[in-house]
Amino acid sequence: MRSPTVSHARPSSREITGIVDAARKVIATKGLSGMSLRTVAEEAGTSVGSISYRIGDRARLVEATLDREIGIMAEQRVQWRARLGPVDPLATGILPDLVCEWLDQSAGPGRHSAIVTCELILLASREPATLPRIAELLDEREGLWRDMLIGRPQADRLANRIASYCLDELPFSIVLAEETDYRLLRHSTIRGLLRDGNAQPVPSATDWHMALVDRLAVPAAPAHDETAPVPEGTKGVLADHIADLIAGQGVGALSHRAVAQLAGVATSSVAHHFPGQRDILFAGVEALYRRMRSQILARDANLRTREIVRLTHECALQALTDPAVLPFAIDMRRRRAENVHLQFAEWLGIPPGSDRARVQAMVMGVIGASLRFMATDSAWLAPIDVLKEWGVTVRSF
């Protein structure tokens, strides 16, 4: 009698894709921290052992997810180039429309992929060695704009500028997709991003832009209290520990217990000074902003403050599952630019307050470039040098 044949067939690409797409769905709904072999197995309707056999451990599953996103982005490049056809987006003036629509697609039909991309970039910004291929994903994203601008003057520089802006904008377009004022503000900012440096908007356009900023202060109001004193003594020490926890592990790691363990105190002591989760988050955010302000010199807007760069994105992603975090995401987005807009206006040769949309756009773009530096473990460029790399005319002092 012949022995039964044991199948040693390799897993099919269809099986692997099904598991990876289940992992993407888990990340999109629970965040990267909520993705484990168990949660993916539940989503895929399979076993942990099956995933281990077909793909490997959790780290390998994360790498496979990145590979999948690289492939999806490559497909998008082809689709968007075909959609544009022979039209010159610069000559026709439709480039701002393309940027807005790409972001809307990312917040709508492409939502899962966009959230996964944001999560992977944040992971790489903390631990670049874990995702060495993240640069390929970022290159594909920039390549989409380069393809649509091919043959146009300074195409590579402009593509880099747009991709950097979109990298910073992406999580906010997702979480604030239903905020009409935010969407209008984004459109105004994108026009500022693409506006020629010699062109100045009419004063009413700047007034409109700032009116939108003011209206967004309403949903952001719960995130700050301008009358609150800077914490001192034990409370101040705990606030710094909270800031350290956010910087090291992200907003999702915050809890009374986690802060107590880091500070070496009883949980009840943390709860005494910061009764609720909102109080903890507020204390940590404010401590991080104080650190950032202390690092901004008169002529050096130091956007290398990694904690702030990551924090705004983490808050936006956290708000997808915890609406209580949303005011912080909106407020931090505003305050990042407020801390440095005078310096950027000076570099750009823009009279203070005359073109806030363009200044805001350039700040966001530089922050997006900074996030790329962090994710790819690349050498940092000073903000003014990033602007020069984009072909933006700047005033040197």
Image (cartoon, helix red, strand yellow):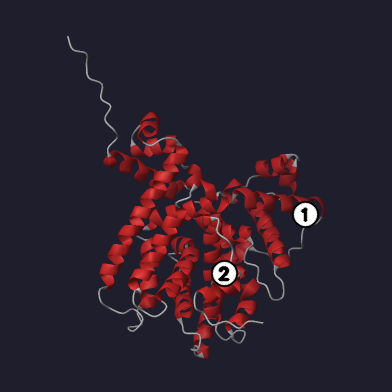
Q: Are marks 2 and 1 in contact (CB under 8 Å)?
A: no
- What is the secondary structure assignment of the residue under circle 2? helix
Residue 31 image position (x, y, % from top left): 48, 48
Quarter of the image for residue 223 reads bottom right
Q: Quadrant of residue 15?
A: top left
Quick check: can you spot residue 322?
no
Residue closest to the far top? 1
Q: Nearer the viewer, residue 74 or 180?
A: 74
Q: Nearer the viewer, residue 18 or 317?
A: 18
Q: Residue at x 74, y 50 (%)?
A: 238
**Residue placed most toward the observer, 70 or 199:** 70
Q: Is residue 388 above or below residue 2?
A: below
Quarter of image, res 110: bottom left
Disc 1 residue type (three-letter): Gly
In the rendering, at what x and y percent does residue 337 appear? 60, 72
Q: Which residue is mark 1?
A: 236
Which residue is identified by label 2?
218
Is residue 39 at least partly visible in the picture?
yes
Query: Residue at 71% across / 61% down in the picture?
Result: 291
Dot 2 amino acid type:
Val
- Left or right: where 345 falls relative to 56: right
Quadrant holding the N terminus:
top left
Question: Going 59% across and 74% down the picture, which residue do you hit?
Answer: 384
The mark lying in front, picked from 2 and 1, is: 1
Task: Tell me the crowding category of disc 1: few under 14, some 14 to 19, or many 20 or more residues within 10 angstroms, Cα based.
Answer: some
For label 2, the crowd category at 10 Å Cα-Cα, with few meaning under 14, some 14 to 19 and many 20 or more, is few
* Residue 56 placement (x, y as % from top left): 41, 35
244 left or right, relative to 59? right
Residue at image location 63% in from the left, 49% down from the top: 248
Quarter holding the C terminus is bottom right
Considering the numbered disc 1 on the image, is that residue within a helix, a strand or a loop? Answer: helix
